Image: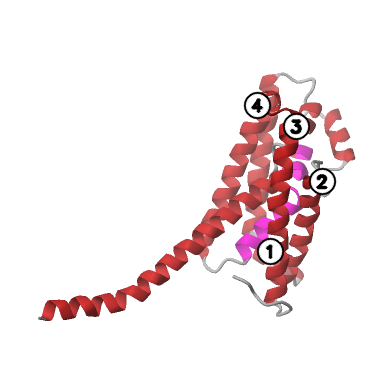
């Protein structure tokens, strides 16, 4: 008779722990998805293909791959650096996380709206950047790596994601998202000619609009989270 009693006793005390672990795992998976999609859509290497091809028009395939590699490494280092220094930057300038969430949401919204119109946002890239890049022999770091890939939107998003995380382990999905995005950016830009031939201008515009739609929703959620943090709106889960 003791065994059933012990089993029932153990079950009673294990269920809350299991439910808590399941909830944390679900939250971590959801956070990982948001981190990957937001960083990837903001860097948006597909939309950078036309500008990249224009800036490297006089270079051969090997030189383009070299530029793509430098741009990907620049994107990785810049986003990781700002993510790691996010809390220090907030304390240094006296910026609160809710304020940065709202500001970051506004930037993402502007970029997302431009993407919905299938055009490269001037928040990430200005005509002057493209013209300056076309005149440079090495465009991998500036302007391709920064600001065309690692622009203000991507930087602010990484800072918000890492600074607002409930535990240190939530930094792992953000870092993985940065690494994956950098690798995808290299792969797309290194094969920019083939990607453009397969997708065509119409395909690139369609993908850009779809990513813009997702990015706009993420931007609105960022702003709602910031407003909820200061008590101006009710938090919705």
Disc 3 secondary structure class: helix
Q: Residue beneath label 1, please?
A: 221
Asked where in the image residue 233 lies, by quadrant, the reply is bottom right
Q: Nearer the viewer, mark 2 or mark 3?
A: 3
Could you tell me how far apart the alpha carbons at marks 1 and 2 are, in whole angstroms?
20 Å
Could you tell me how far apart the alpha carbons at marks 4 and 2 are, in whole angstroms?
23 Å
Q: Residue beneath label 2, please?
A: 121
**Height in image: 177 above or below 139?**
below
- Mark identifier at residue 191: 4
Front-most of residues 236 and 232 = 236
| Residue 22 image position (x, y, % from top left) | 41, 65
Asked where in the image residue 130 lies, by quadrant, the reply is top right
Could you tell me how far apart the alpha carbons at marks 4 and 1 are, in whole angstroms?
34 Å
Q: Nearer the viewer, mark 1 or mark 2?
A: 1
Q: Tell me if I can see residue 58 in this picture.
A: yes
- Mark identifier at residue 202: 3
Disc 2 secondary structure class: loop
Q: Is residue 163 left or right of residue 169?
A: right
Asked where in the image residue 224 lies, by quadrant, the reply is bottom right
Colour approach in the figure? secondary structure
Q: Nearer the viewer, mark 3 or mark 1?
A: 3
For the record, the magenta segment spans: 142-163
Sequence-wise first label, 4 or 2:
2
Disc 4 secondary structure class: loop
Q: Is residue 105 left or right of residue 21?
A: right
């Amino acid at each position: 008779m003791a065994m059933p009693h012990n089993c029932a006793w153990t079950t009673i005390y294990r269920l809350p722990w299991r439910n808590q672990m399941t909830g944390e795992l679900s939250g971590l998976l959801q956070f990982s998805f948001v981190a990957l999609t937001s960083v990837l859509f903001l860097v948006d290497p597909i939309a950078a293909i036309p500008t990249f091809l224009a800036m490297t028009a006089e270079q051969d395939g090997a030189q383009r791959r070299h530029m793509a590699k430098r741009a990907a490494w620049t994107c990785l280092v810049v986003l990781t650096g700002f993510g790691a220094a996010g809390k220090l930057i907030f304390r240094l300038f006296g910026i609160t996380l809710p304020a940065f969430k709202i500001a970051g949401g506004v930037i993402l919204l502007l970029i997302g709206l431009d993407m919905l119109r299938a055009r490269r946002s001037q928040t990430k890239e200005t005509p002057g950047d493209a013209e300056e890049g076309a005149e440079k022999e090495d465009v991998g770091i500036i302007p391709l790596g920064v600001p065309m890939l690692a622009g203000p939107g991507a930087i602010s998003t990484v800072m918000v994601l890492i600074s607002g995380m409930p535990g240190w382990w939530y930094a792992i999905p953000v870092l993985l998202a940065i690494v994956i995005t950098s690798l995808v950016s290299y792969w797309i830009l290194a094969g920019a000619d083939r990607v453009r031939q397969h997708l065509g201008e119409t395909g690139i515009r369609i993908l850009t609009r779809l990513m813009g739609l997702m990015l706009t929703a993420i931007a609105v959620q960022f702003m709602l989270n910031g407003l909820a943090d200061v008590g101006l709106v009710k938090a919705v889960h």
